[in-house]
Amino acid sequence: MNASVSMPIAYANYWVFVILMMIGLYAIIAKKNLAKRVIGLNILQTAVILFFISIGSKQQATIPIIEHVHDISRVAIEARDYINPLPHVLMLTAIVVAVATFGVSMALIIKIYARYGTLEEDEIIELSRDIET
Amino acid sequence: MKAGALAVVVILGAVLIFCSHGFPPWGDPASPASRHVSPYYIEKSMRDTSVPNIVTAVLADYRGYDTMFETIVIFTAGIACIFLLRTPQKTKTETRLYRHVPTGITLRIEKGGKFPEDSIDFERIDSEWVPYDLIVKTTCRLIVPFIQLFALYVIAHGHYSPGGGFQGGVILGAATLLLAVAFDLRSAKRRLSEKMAAILGTLGVFIYAGTGIACMILDANFLDYSALAPLLGVDSISARSYGILIVEVGVGMAVMAVMVMLYYNISSAGKQDEGL
Amino acid sequence: MFWQIEFFIFIIVIILAVGAISVKDLLSAAILFGAYSFMMCLLWAIMGAVDVAFTEASVGAGISTVLFVAAVFRTSRRTKD
């Protein structure tokens, strides 16, 4: 598959990444519900993964699986013909870590709800202050 | 609070978009990301390991240490979920709901009462009960073996096509989750109990680390698979290919066990008697 | 591929992300989040990252959505903002 695109899209990737990252950051800062904050965190993580994947692409290059030829030792493999596989490797680990933290945060949300009866942050702060005094 | 957050986010976004003009244009082959060690991986991985999928070769062979710790991270997430949520089950003093099938009456048996034995007339139900749905249950029962087969294919074929240990492990876990969602949690637990899932997870991590230690015992570096060549009976390049396959199997087992453990604990909030 | 397809998917991804954090019902947020995950997977497949797209498809649809819906089932469904 050729990844050849024309100039109008040259920087639009980075803009979309910045917009998505800011959407995620806004959800983490401004939302009161805990589950919405976790969604915002995940949006931030996938936006960063999008950025890393987009810096590894090359024009007129194909996916990083070496094409099947009969005598592989005779054919020279050029680095120009394949897109950069190194960001893909790092981002696989990033996705695994993202799903691990997502699972643990869901467990924490259930525990908080069982303790306080609500998931809104201001109500939780009030309830914990009432319990203290 | 929201206006302040919006202002911060907009200003930060504007600064970042302004700075993004300094990046190399998209798809530039001479960009700094594609210049230093990445050409070596592309050109030499086939000669060193005879695995066409460059991403799998780099993930499991050249950067195998990181992948081992990634497996340990996901295993730790499963264990953390158990620590947070799991409450011990008291079988003697719990309340159960039974339904008398011929008449449709629901019985609630309180603590300390006598449960009806396994008979055709009484079936045990959850608090939210739906009638028997033939299409969903039959379809799921038919399709789960094919999902598991496809997951095994993804793990085994990770050398030649996109895939590998993690993806296959997630799909295997998703097959058990499908069983738990279509039927109920107890029938899924009968097929893959929590103890067996924990043992499989630990075994998966153990396989990965054990391969590395086996390489060390055979007088090479940790996770240097070419040292396994005399053990497997092939030359050292194919030994690296087989070493990648072994650790992918380990990763797949660990990931499947953790996905199942996460679902069991989250959907029943720790008590593991009824789920979604 | 054609840059028009990528542009279209960018627009959809941004709309889904904004929607996932602003609906008032947590179950709808979970489904929108699953759709966002699928659209990101499509984007990465277009850019040539097939392994990463495979992982995101299986994790986003198979695990994240199911875990989120299970957690919403155990807590409350409505949110105030």
Image (spheres, coloured by chain):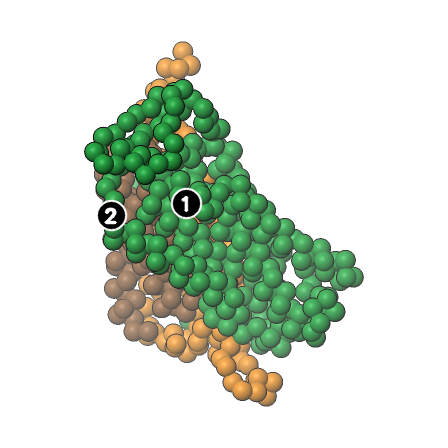
Chain colours: A orange, B green, C brown
In the image, residue A59 lies at what x, y percent?
A: 41, 75
What is the x, y in percent for residue A110? 39, 33
Name the residue nearer the viewer: A2 or A55.
A2
Q: Earlier in the sequence, mark 1 or mark 2?
A: 2
Which corner quadrant holds the N terminus of chain B? top left
Determine whether, in the image, residue B229 is placed left or right of residue B102. Answer: right
Does any portion of residue B28 appear in the rendered image? Answer: no
Q: Secondary structure at mark 2?
A: loop
Q: Dot 1: few (<14), some (14–19), or many (≥20) neighbours within 10 Å?
A: many
Q: Residues within 10 Å of mark 2 (few under 14, many from 20)?
A: few
Residue name at image x 36 percent, y 50 percent = B178
Residue C22: give its label.
Answer: none
Q: Quadrant of residue B172?
A: bottom left
Label 1 element class = helix
Q: Is residue B269 above or below residue B61?
A: above
Q: Of C21 and B97, which appears nearest the observer? A: B97
Q: Would residue B37 be seen by someone viewing this image from the given angle?
A: yes
Q: Is residue A120 left or right of residue B206?
A: left
**Callout 2 amino acid:** Asp
Q: Is residue C28 above or below residue A18?
A: above
Could you say where residue B11 lies in the image, as x and y percent from the top left?
34, 46
Res B226 quadrant in image: bottom right
Please report the residue visible at 50 percent of the width from the left and 72 percent of the height from the top: B160
Residue bearing mark 2:
B133
- What is the CA distance from the residue labelled 1 to the residue labelled 2? 17 Å
Residue sticking out furthest to the right: B219
Q: Residue at x 74, y 69 (%)?
A: B230
| Viewport quadrant of the C terminus of chain B | top left
Q: Which residue is mark 1?
A: B188
Residue B75, position as x, y percentages in the image: 54, 45
